[in-house]
Image (tube, grey):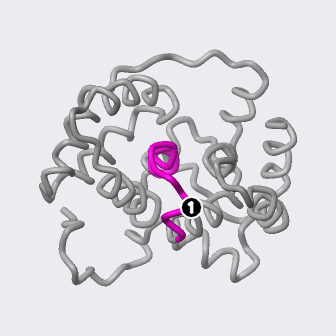
Amino acid sequence: MINFFKRKKPIKTEKDESLYNVLLKSEEENSLVEIDFSNLSQDGRYRGEFEIEILKGRKLNREDSTKLNEAVLKFYERESDSVNLICDFFKDKRAIEVFSEFESFIFSLDIFEEKRLAGLSILLMRDTRVIEAIKFGIMLAHFYPLVNYPAAVKIIVNLGIYPEFTYYSLGVLKQLNYYELVRDNILRRGLKETQIIEENME
């Protein structure tokens, strides 16, 4: 089990390399279009097909977030298994379908720790291999001002070039006063599905 609170990170192998690093390497090698995340997807689709359906009117379920809430509280308390628990939760849940319940939970807390939530967001986006956990990490940026977290902006933009994450990346980046700049960066580097999603979001 990975301990995300240790300063010294284990050496990554191809098998456990984060999806974020896979995307960066694939872009560098001009092989982004060749990525196959079907074995990591809940329904075998991994190029934003579900998000395109949402944009075309697909109705979403509203899922319970209790286990997720508990895992996030564990992260606040610096428990080493918290990120793994979040990733386990999202192996059979969609981030967008639990987000409303999670949002209610976050706003019910007496103490809102923005920096801790931003830290969790970055960890999920940068260091994990569960697609829906990465999407959740992106969506957490709705709860903190991205302008104060340039590292998060960079990660979100880089994830946004891949269509499975485009919908979520563009959604949170709209809070920036230079949104058009980062949007154009994503579209220039992304795949054709990236552009389709952006066009349907307008």
Q: Which residue is mark 1?
A: 147
Query: Could you tell me the amino acid type at mark 1?
Result: Val
Does 165 sit above or below residue 108? Answer: below
Residue 15 image position (x, y, % from top left): 40, 70
Does 30 sit above or below residue 93? Answer: below
Is residue 147 a member of the stretch shown in magenta? yes
Residue 85 image position (x, y, % from top left): 24, 46
> SS of the residue at dot 1?
helix
- Main secondary-structure element of the magenta-colored stretch: helix
Residue at point 58%, 64% (across, down):
153
Q: Examine the rendering and report whether any part of residue 178 can be seen.
A: yes
Residue 165 image position (x, y, % from top left): 62, 50
The magenta segment: 134-150
Does 158 sit above or below residue 131? Answer: below
Q: Examine the rendering and report whether any part of residue 40 can be seen.
A: no
Left of 199 or right of it: where is 165?
Answer: left
Residue at point 39%, 23% (across, down):
101
Residue at point 81%, 57% (across, down):
180
Dot 1 alpha-carbon crowd within 10 angstroms: few under 14, some 14 to 19, many 20 or more: some
Does 62 sit above or below residue 9? Answer: above
Is residue 56 a member of the stretch shown in magenta? no
Residue 105 image position (x, y, % from top left): 31, 27
Which part of the image, by quadrant, shows the C terminus? top right
Left of 146 or right of it: where is 13?
Answer: left
